[in-house]
Image (cartoon, coloured by chain):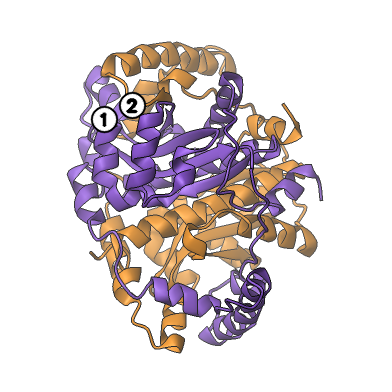
Chain colours: A orange, B purple
Amino acid sequence: MNSMIETILAHRSVRKFTPEKLSEKTIETLVEAAQMASTSSYIQAYSIIGIKEQSKKNKLAELAGNQPYVAENGHLFIFCADFHRHNIAGKQEGTEVIPAIESTEKMIVGITDASLAAQNCALAAESLGYGICYIGGLRNNIKTVSELLELPDHVIPLFGLCVGVPAAQTETKPRLPLEGVYFEDKYPDDSQHIAQLEKYNSIVSEYYNKRTAGNRNQRWTEQITGMLSSVKRAHMKQFLQEKGYGRH
Amino acid sequence: MNSMIETILAHRSVRKFTPEKLSEKTIETLVEAAQMASTSSYIQAYSIIGIKEQSKKNKLAELAGNQPYVAENGHLFIFCADFHRHNIAGKQEGTEVIPAIESTEKMIVGITDASLAAQNCALAAESLGYGICYIGGLRNNIKTVSELLELPDHVIPLFGLCVGVPAAQTETKPRLPLEGVYFEDKYPDDSQHIAQLEKYNSIVSEYYNKRTAGNRNQRWTEQITGMLSSVKRAHMKQFLQEKGYGRH
């Protein structure tokens, strides 16, 4: 165990921040940390938009489903998959890159690159004592978010990352048992999943029970299947294709 | 600056490892670190397959385009997007989850969740002095990889992560200028990209020139557009749909 692993294991999402803003220097450090993540064949297929205008943060908070911490935090980063600069490079070099950029393979690359960079940013922030929270809710209204940020074709906003000084203590949330997530040499039989889900349901149920003084004791499978009982963000496929992602 | 940020900024891919294997305890620590990454609405939509059988590692190395370090390392993790356990949970709870699981939105969630977890794993490994290398090449033959690992529907192998004791020194590779990746409040005009690409081309060209004693001085735009001049892994869309990803 070392301090990095301690920081990683101590992660919890923070949804209430003090008004203290991140300094320019800190923002720069966090972006530099993001940039040093691995990237598929050196492609660097992402961009990061930092939001400073308070009116824009308020609008994004509303678009993300009225999450106040999207408006009130030390800094808000929006991570985007981005092949627009590669398209510019293609024009400069006289090379047709659109068929490659618009492939499903490159969609995977863009989402992966942006996510690896974001996690570096998140951990760098946490190592400095800040709290963080990812905001997938931006995808509720991804087209409006995209317009608000003036994103061209081949750029899609994937998620936000709120960073700030925590104003409230939160707890780490228990993850699936290791044996439910990590397997060796091949994928396990369903019986292994079923045993691990049973074990995990007790853990999660106890966690909620304790945290809510007995008012909630949901099992994980209950919570998650409830969430998966309807299709959310059904606009996603069309939006991606309009922006030039995963066309073929 | 602290030791975590120092580790993040010192990242370089390692492609030659000593034969030393990771201990069970270290593998467990790295998986626990992976699991503590943020996950969309607590969904934990990924699995990790650790490969111990040498014959399987050899086969994966071949499938990834004959990359020897996929066979020879301290440990090989394969990160998969995974909604299979959610499907099992749906059956247990009597809830129909397939339409949600097979949406494009959940494909984004699976890729993002797996990537955030992988980056925690990678950084935890680097903090312990190991070197790492991501292996996107597994997607060259994703269907065969998937069969080799016996992955059911709703599980797709995204990339590998080789971890081990470095057997050769490598250098950090210069990233895009910060001003080419990080923007405030809105996406920039093309002129900003063009200026940053020009600046970056000099940096990359000088980096290659120095590293190869003058034998290579490729610009970044040249290298990347060369790579993007043809469609790679054109099977990806069909494979994803067959496995139940992004069907609608």
Q: Is residue B92 left or right of residue A143?
A: left
Q: Quadrant of residue A194?
A: top left
User: Residue A115: percent from the left, percent from the top?
Assistant: 51, 51
Q: From the viewer's side, name the closer residue of B59 and B138.
A: B59
Is B159 above or below relative to A34?
A: above
Q: From the viewer's side, name the closer residue of A70 and B243.
A: B243
Q: Which residue is mark 1?
A: B150
User: Residue B20: percent from the left, percent from the top?
Assistant: 60, 30
Query: For the residue labelled by badge 1, is the local secondary structure a helix, a strand or a loop?
Result: loop
The 10 Å Cα crowd at callout 1, few under 14, some 14 to 19, many 20 or more, is: some
Same chain under badges 1 and 2? The reply is no
In percent of the image, x 52 and y 64: which residue is there?
Answer: A42
Query: Does any portion of residue A27 appear in the rendered image?
Result: yes
Q: Which mark is residue A186?
A: 2
- Do residues under tags 1 and 2 come within 8 Å of each other at their CB atoms? yes
- Count every numbered label the image shows and give the total: 2
Going by the numbered disc 2, the residue's amino acid type is Lys
Q: Chain of mark 1?
A: B
Q: Chain of mark 2?
A: A
In percent of the image, x 35 and y 22: which residue is there?
Answer: A222
The 10 Å Cα crowd at callout 2, few under 14, some 14 to 19, many 20 or more, is: some
Q: Which mark is residue A16?
A: none
Query: For the residue labelled by badge 2, is the local secondary structure a helix, a strand or a loop?
Result: loop
Outermost residue on the right side: it is: B1
Query: Does any portion of residue B247 appear in the rendered image?
Result: no
